[in-house]
Amino acid sequence: MSEKQMGELLAAGFSPDDVEAGEPVEIWPENLPAYDAFCGMSTQWRVGMSGATGLDYNALPVVLRLQGAPRADWQQLFVDIRVMEQQALLSMRAE
């Protein structure tokens, strides 16, 4: 695991023990913009007394602009990111 990946993992509230070693997962090209935006939001988690509560959506337009996402795609990217956010929250709360 690279230092960058380790930093992203820790920023998202995970430890190396939370990641199972296994086969790489393929990301379909049509999902890559949403994945990239979700990764770009990795330091934007709102955290309360019981852990992460969700992403700070105020940062999302900045991330999308800096990644060059076409404005016409923003609505669908938001929907896609929320799906990943919900799954991440479920994973974090599973412990």
Image: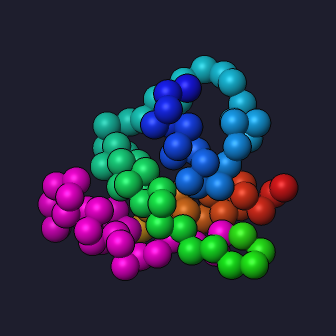
Of 25 and 36, the residue lying toward us: 36
Position of residue 40 measured from the top left corner of the image (x, y, whole percent): 38, 54
Position of residue 45 measured from the top left corner of the image (x, y, whole percent): 54, 68
Left or right of 62: which side holds 3?
right
Taking the view exactly as shown, the residue that stands out farthest to the right is 95
Q: Main secondary structure of the magenta part?
A: helix
Position of residue 50 measured from the top left corner of the image (x, y, whole percent): 77, 75
Q: Where 61 falls versus 92 (above or below)?
A: below
Q: Where 95 falls versus 20 (above or below)?
A: below
Of 29 and 38, the residue lying toward us: 38
- Give the image quarter of residue 15: top right
Of 11 and 23, the residue lying toward us: 11
Residue 21 is covered by the magenta coloring: no
Q: Quadrant of the N terminus?
A: top right
Q: Which residue: 47% across, 66% down?
A: 44
Residue 63 is covered by the magenta coloring: yes
Position of residue 48 measured from the top left corner of the image (x, y, whole percent): 68, 78
Q: Which residue: 27% across, 71% down?
A: 61
Left or right of 74: which side holds 59?
right
- Residue 83 seen from this side: no
What sort of colour scheme is used for the picture? Answer: rainbow
Q: Quadrant of the C terminus?
A: bottom right
Q: Which residue: 34% across, 69% down?
A: 60
Left or right of 29: which side holds 23?
right
Q: Where 84 falls versus 45 (above or below)?
A: above
- Give the image quarter of residue 63: bottom left
How many numbered marks have been drawn onto this rendered protein structure? 0
- Residue 52 seen from this side: yes
Which residues are the magenta region?
A: 52-78
